[in-house]
Structure formats: structure tokens, C-alpha cells
Image: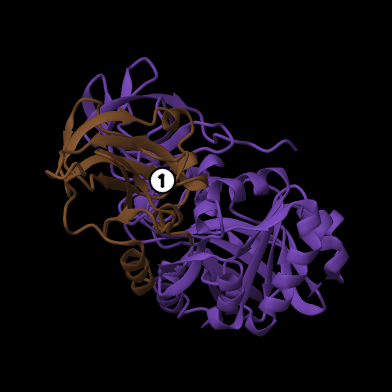
Amino acid sequence: MSVPAELRYTPEHEWVSVEGTSASVGITEYAAQQLGDVVYVSLPTPGSTVTAGEPCGEVESVKSVSDLYSPVDGEVVEVNTELEDDPSLVNAEPYTAGWMFRVRVAEDGNGDAALPPDLLSAAEYEELTKSAG
Amino acid sequence: MHAVHERLGATMTAFAGWQMPLRYASETAEHLAVRRAAGLFDLSHMGEIAVRGLGAGAALDYALIGQLSALRPGRARYTMICADDGGVLDDLVVYRLGEEEFLVIANASNTSVVFEALVARTAGFDARVTDATSDYALVAIQGPESAGILAPLAGGLDLAAMKYYAGGFGSVAGRSAWVARTGYTGEDGFEVFCQPADAVIVWDALLARGAPAGLVPAGLAARDTLRLEAGMPLYGNELGPDVTPFEAGLGRVVKFDKPGDFVGREALAARASSGPRKRLAGLTIESRRIARHGYPVLADGEARGAVTSGAPSPTLGVPIAMAYLDPDVGADQALSVGIRGAAVPAKLTDLPFYRRRQ
């Protein structure tokens, strides 16, 4: 199970990749495996505002529908439209081609993105998935 | 078998007290492998109930809605066990293993209900009912390549001559087994009932022999989408105590002309003459979203039914569903399914969604 070290995570199995004030979001390989084949992804509308910890979309697999939670606060600037035609990218390449949406996050005063303090490190997230079995 | 599934990387799921493989990798790939080549299923959770005795056939004629006494040894029949009010307690496959021996296959979640009902209903007959679930493991091989994969491993069985819904005693990988040409996928295939201690040997032999032909291990998730495409009902979804076989479109399974009384006859006869209260229909969903169990079905904007099963159809490439609709809902009405607040258009589609080429 891959948990890239450079990403941050949520207990709801989203990952965040931060560059400057741009945060890319997807779901983890662990989540994708648990869901099974993803058949439909409903993403937030570009221009809309998302709030950390709040549902902003849905990930639908053969067996279930799960809410997609935003890991960060900010404005949605882009969504992965490839997923409309090929939602299986979420299973095949959860950390790259299967990304879901990008958010412009406020600055923290030092020029960095203001991220919620409770995002998990890769090590912490890995621990969480292990204890979940 | 649990260690085998773990070694194969299965995602396991708790089902009726059993830990069963839900999928090994991609349920879509497993589904397509069964349609194009073959899939291997561990179905050891299914209930096996033995009914033996001179009066076993007559006892089952009374206990079930089918005429099992007319079944020849070595043949199988799809039937149901109903309550007095005609409601479905379970759907069953019954094998006649011998003149005085039947094996009733029940859904895992219903095994004890079926067992207890059979014990009670056969009390006045020369028949003994035994819950033999722990005596059997069940490995199913399903798909067009099944016969070719199984034949070299089978002993004492003429698979080429074995008809659909027939079976025989023989061996698989040197282990004695009851092998039947039955299944729940809409494909040709076989079900191998062997001793639990032999299950791993049978499984591994079929997997090794079948892998070059495209056989893959397949889980319950693929089994569910396969049976849905084939229009086969599932207890708890299309079938339950609140419906009779007539609502499910399976009135032909009720054998009114068999000799003697049977449990549910009066209520089922009344239902047969008054017509079903609702009817099971197939739907094709015009979206990628899945119409799931319990979602409302709207006809011209009015709630007129509910989805019983829904999934993406890997064969057709669109989501499909089965639903109970009011009997008068017709193809001339605009149908939609309420999917979490959105009315998504749907089309009435004849069942089954998929029929294999003969």
C-alpha cells in the first residue's frame, strides 16, 4: 500500500499536495482499495468555496457511495474532468492521474498555505490504516 | 480457505457470520473474466440441507412450491420455500443426489430458517432433515472456459454430456465431490461440492489449471453484478417475506398441479388469480450513477416503485437496476430514479439484461 511521504492526509482518507497556496486533493490508495472499482465521482464546482472537514462531493463505487471531504479551506480553482469519462483512474493512479480537485488556500502570513493543523503526516496516516486493519 | 483468500489479496467481508471474499482486485475485471473466460468462487457460506428417506420427495413437495418428487436423480431444480401467506422465505436449488436423497441449497443468511421450516414441515413424512452445511465446501467455476478447465481434473464425470441443471458424483483433483452444472452468473459453469478439508486442494488445482485460460478468482461483488445482469433475483433484494413468486415474475416456479397440498398453496392460488401487487422490472440508468437498493422510482414524476438492486453493468457499460413498480407503470411513461435528491432518467429494459450465446 503506497502512502507517499510528501503528502498530507485526513482521517477520511483524502490526500493533499501543497505547492505554494495551491492544494491538490484526491483519495488515498487505501481508500480506493476499500471502495473497490470507482464508477462515478461528483466534484465541487470550480469557483465554489470548500471548508475543511465538510463534504464537497461523492465517490461512488460498485458497492457504495461515500462522501468526499475537503481537507482544506479555500476556493476550488480546478477539478479533474478526466474522471467524468474514466473514474477508474482513481483506482489505477490515486495519487497522480486520479487527483480530484485543486483549491486556492489562504496564506498564513509567511507566504505558505494556511492548512488545518490536524492534517496527518504519511506516518500518522499509515498508522491509522493499519489500526483499521 | 481463509488463508488462501488472504494470500490472493482478497478484501474480505462479513456475511451471515462468514468471512467471505468480496473482491480480489477489481470486481469489474473479475466480472468480465467470468463472461469471457472463467472465474472461481468460494461459496462455502451457502447452506446445504440434506433430506433423506423414502418419503423425501413427497416431503419436499409439501414443504416447497416445486414438485421435487418428479426430479430424476442427478438433476437439479430452482425452487422456493414460502410461508403460509405465500411470502418467500428463501429461494433454493435442490439436487436429487439419489432416489432417497436430496440436497437443498439455501442462502447463507437463511440456512437456519430453511432448516427449521423443513424439519417442521416434514414431520409427518418418512424423511430426515439434516443441516449439512459444515459437511460441504462449495467451489464454483463459472464462465465459457469452465468445462475445458474442469474436465482434465474431473474423475468419473462426463462433463461434456452433463446437461445444465444436472450433476453427478465423481472427483475433482482426486477429491470426491458432487459436481453440478449450475450457477448464479448467467454463464455456463459448474459447482463443486466437496469436503471442507479438500476445498483448498480443489481450489488450487482449478486456479492453476485455469489461469492460462484466463480464469481468475472472483468475489461476491462480481457474483452480485453477474447475477444482476442475468436477471436473477437475490433474497433480501428482489425476494423476501413481503413478496410472492408472482411479484418477482417467477410464478412458473409454483407447481399448482402437483399432487397433494403444499405450504402456501391457498395464498399463492389467490395471488395467481388476483394478479401481482407489483412487478419486477429491469431499468437502464442514463447516467454513471448507480440506482441503489431502496431508491425511489418515479413515473411521470410520481413515486411508483423502488429499486431492489443496482450496479454498473460491466458487460453493457451502463448502470442497470431491478425495481418493483406498480403493475400499471408502462413504457409510455417517463421513468426516473431518485438518486440522492436528483431525478436521473431511466428506461424500462427487458430482463435479463444479459443472455449468453448458446
Residue A44 visible somewhere in the drawing: yes
Q: Is residue B322 above or below residue B253?
A: above
Q: Is residue A114 left or right of residue B184?
A: left
Residue B152 occupies quadrant: bottom right
Q: Is residue B95 left or right of residue A70?
A: right
Q: Residue furthest left?
A: A109
Image position, residue B151 (x, y; %):
85, 61
Q: Is residue A98 above or below residue B60?
A: above
Residue A123 occupies quadrant: bottom left
In the rendered image, which quarter contains the N terminus of chain B? bottom right
- Mark 1 lies on a secondary structure that is strand
In the rendered image, which quarter contains the C terminus of chain B? top right
Residue at the image point whose x is 55% and y is 74% from the top: B48
Q: Is residue B216 left or right of residue B109?
A: right
Task: Give the residue at mark 1.
Answer: A61
Q: Residue furthest front?
A: A110
Q: Colour of chain A?
A: brown
Inspect the image, locate mark 1, and give the three-letter code of the amino acid beneath it: Ser
Image position, residue B138 (x, y; %):
62, 70
Residue at the image point whose x is 49% and y is 40% from the top: A89
Residue at the image point whose x is 45% and y is 75% from the top: B115
Residue B255 visible somewhere in the drawing: no
Image position, residue B168 (x, y; %):
77, 68
The chain letter corresponding to purple is B
Q: Residue furthest top?
A: B332
